Amino acid sequence: RSRFLIPSVDWRVKNAVTPVKNQGQCGSCWAFSTTGAIEGAYAVKTGKLVSFSEQELVSCDRTDMGCSGGEMDNAFSWIKQQGGLCRESDYTYTSGSGIRGCCRKTCHPIPESKVVQWVDVNATDVALEEAIMKGPVSVAIEADQFGFQMYSSGVYTGKCGTNLDHGVLAVGYGTDKGQDYWLVKNSWDTTWGDNGYIKLARGVKQEGGQCGILLSASYPILV
């Protein structure tokens, strides 16, 4: 590990993370990971925390598959083409029951939320730390293991695999009782985990990191 990096980061205390959301029965984790990264980048850039619309992505982004999954980089590309993303309050989430819904273009994207490009982070601890120092980062993990699903507190060091099946948001990192961790925001409501968050072990020897968190990290750069 580089000794020049900041020892801990938590973007929640810097007002760059919206409250934990709930994707419901829809496989739209990719949309929540994407909005989280946009929300973070927008807050860092403008000083304003705005909740962006997952529903617009689920219903209108046809590169991805709505409630059947998607990829954050695809969503960044779609937001780039659209010139930005709408506010959550203008296009609220209705897919919790598992239905994608029709695209309705009645909202206006926030101009400063337009993605110019996105950065795919190298699959190392140091590269992800450096990325998180700039703002929240979209990451993919394997989340289908029992230990992960039953997590409630502390740093999760249990087995969880690297077969990526879930998009989440890395909003910080630090050390808890001598164990380094990544601070990850999920989209399974505040009733899951530690008020909707999990601390995943950081610096593990497994290739791809704990739950594969290093394998598909990316963040947007806004206009």
Image: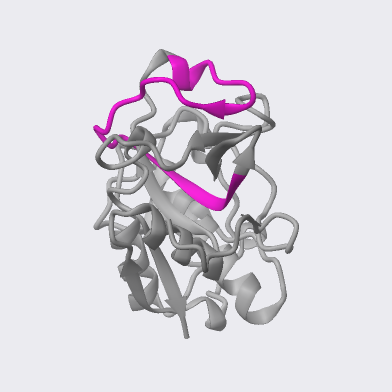
Colour convention = one colour
Place of residue 125 in the rendered image (x, y in percent of width and height, measured from the top left): 39, 52
Place of residue 140 in the rendered image (x, y in percent of width and height, measured from the top left): 36, 44
- Is residue 185 at all visible to an observer of this figure? no
Place of residue 55 in the rendered image (x, y in percent of width and height, measured from the top left): 49, 51
| Observer-nearest of 85 and 191 | 191
- Residue 152 is one of the magenta-drawn residues: yes
Q: Looking at the image, which residue is at 65% across and 58% down?
A: 11
Q: Looking at the image, which residue is at 54% across and 83% down?
A: 111
Q: Looking at the image, which residue is at 30% across and 47% down?
A: 70
| Observer-nearest of 164 and 201 | 201
170 relative to 13 in the view: left or right: left
- Is residue 189 at all visible to an observer of this figure? yes
Quadrant in which the N terminus is drawn:
bottom left
User: Which residue, as the protein is rendered here, is positioned at the far front?
Assistant: 3
- Which quadrant of the structure image shows residue 191? top right
Place of residue 190 in the rendered image (x, y in percent of width and height, measured from the top left): 67, 31
Q: Is residue 113 above or below residue 78?
A: below
Q: Looking at the image, which residue is at 54% across and 66% down?
A: 133
135 relative to 140 in the view: left or right: right
- For the record, the magenta segment spans 147-174
Count of numbered circles on the image:
0
55 relative to 17 in the view: left or right: left
Q: Is residue 83 above or below residue 134?
A: below
- Residue 58 is one of the magenta-drawn residues: no
